[in-house]
């Protein structure tokens, strides 16, 4: 298994060992008890690394205020990934029509209307409004684990429509933010290597939409604003990003009016571990039965 790269084989192996449970929709599946046990163990390992960092711990729902979403400019760059929440708010007659269409297998989406929330497209987005105002000299650091939605239906197991991200967000002066980003890039890579994963870091870019997106991606790479830690999970030629680091410069500082004490726009950066992807990398590398993994890996994860 470790040397054979096949998305279908990985998916079937995860299903066969009851690590994931198919639900009939590409890019969506349930998680079995052993999958969750490994995920929790890795999450605890990350917590151990960050224990003395002084982060504020926050928890957010998998939905986001639509006004915050629109303000974030996500739709300018990634309209293909967004997921809006619609609901029914019609009359009795419209409800009857809705019900009849459903039973007849007809389209019924036009009988719903957009709500005040969207599905969270990035784990860090809910926190930025809470930074509005002046941050202290040492900046602020927030630790979260959030569900994220991306409209990328696929039978390739590491490409999910709903997944969890263990996210840290740093806000402050450029010096504070860049130093933190560089520290975690080293720390995150070392953690994954300590689990005997063939991980490496590289400059990356986001999946910007359209022709103009190629220019944005090239600029992002040129400025080294995004790094990823990569592990071959479904391909050696195109390894899977299991951890990403994004330096936003003053993008969110401008949008949400976040400033440092000298009146300058604050800068932000975030790092996120794709929790399901890390777990799949472990199963791909070490096999589907954790009790048979190398002793050093089991000890590092306290499994």
Image: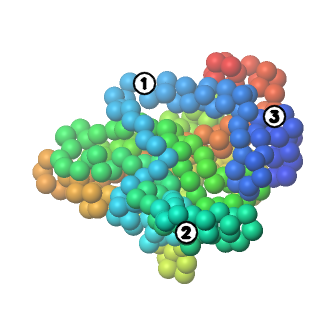
Q: Nearer the viewer, residue 61 or 138?
A: 61
Q: CA distance from mark 2 to mark 3?
A: 42 Å
Dots 2, 3 in contact, CB < 8 A:
no
Q: Residue at x 30, y 51 (%)?
A: 129
Who comes first in sequence, dot 1 or dot 2?
Answer: 1
Image vertical order of residue 101 relative to residue 38, above or below = below
Image vertical order of residue 205 relative to residue 299, above or below = below
Residue 149 placement (x, y as % from top left): 56, 54
Residue 30 placement (x, y as % from top left): 71, 41
Q: Nearer the viewer, residue 158 or 75?
A: 75
Who comes first in sequence, dot 2 or dot 3?
Answer: 3
* Mark 2 Cα-neighbour bin, 10 Å: few <14, some 14–19, many ≥20: some
Count the marks. 3
Horizontal arrangement in the rendering, residue 141 relative to residue 101 (left or right): left
Task: Name the residue tied to disc 3.
Answer: 18
* Mark 3 Cα-neighbour bin, 10 Å: few <14, some 14–19, many ≥20: some
Q: In terms of secondary structure, where does tag 1 sit?
A: loop
* Residue 235 visible: no
Residue 290 placement (x, y as % from top left): 77, 25
Furthest residue in direction left, as rendered = 262
Residue 85 placement (x, y as % from top left): 51, 59
Q: Could you say which disc has been placed on residue 51 in the image?
A: 1
Q: Quadrant of the N terminus?
A: top right
Furthest residue in direction front, as rendered = 93
Task: Name the residue tied to disc 2.
Answer: 94
């Amino acid at each position: 298994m470790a040397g054979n790269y096949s998305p279908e084989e990985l998916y079937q192996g995860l299903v066969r060992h009851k690590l994931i449970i198919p639900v009939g929709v590409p890019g969506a599946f349930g998680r079995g008890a052993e999958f969750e046990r490994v995920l929790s163990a890795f999450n605890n390992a990350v917590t151990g690394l960050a224990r003395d960092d002084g982060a504020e711990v926050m928890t957010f729902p998998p939905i986001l205020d639509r006004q915050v979403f629109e303000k974030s400019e996500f739709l300018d760059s990634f309209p293909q990934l967004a997921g809006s929440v619609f609901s029914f708010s019609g009359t009795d007659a419209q409800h009857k029509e809705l019900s009849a269409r459903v039973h007849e297998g007809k389209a019924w989406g036009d009988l719903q209307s957009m709500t005040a929330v969207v599905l969270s497209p990035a784990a860090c987005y809910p926190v930025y409004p809470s930074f509005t105002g002046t941050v202290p000299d040492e900046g602020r650091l927030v630790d979260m684990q959030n569900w994220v939605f991306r409209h990328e239906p696929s039978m390739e197991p590491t490409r999910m429509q709903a997944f969890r991200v263990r996210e840290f967000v740093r806000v402050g002066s450029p010096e504070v933010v860049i130093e933190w980003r560089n520290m975690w890039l080293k720390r995150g890579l070392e953690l994954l290597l300590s689990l005997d994963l063939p991980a490496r870091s590289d400059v990356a870019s986001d999946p910007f939409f359209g022709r103009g997106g190629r220019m944005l991606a090239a600029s992002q790479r040129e400025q080294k604003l995004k790094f990823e830690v990569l592990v071959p999970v479904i391909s050696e030629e195109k390894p899977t990003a299991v951890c990403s680091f994004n330096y936003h410069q003053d993008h969110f500082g401008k949008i949400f009016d976040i400033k440092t004490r000298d009146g300058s726009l604050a800068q932000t950066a975030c790092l996120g571990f794709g929790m399901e992807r890390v777990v799949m990398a472990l199963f791909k590398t070490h096999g589907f039965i954790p009790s048979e993994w190398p002793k050093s890996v089991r000890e590092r994860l306290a499994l």
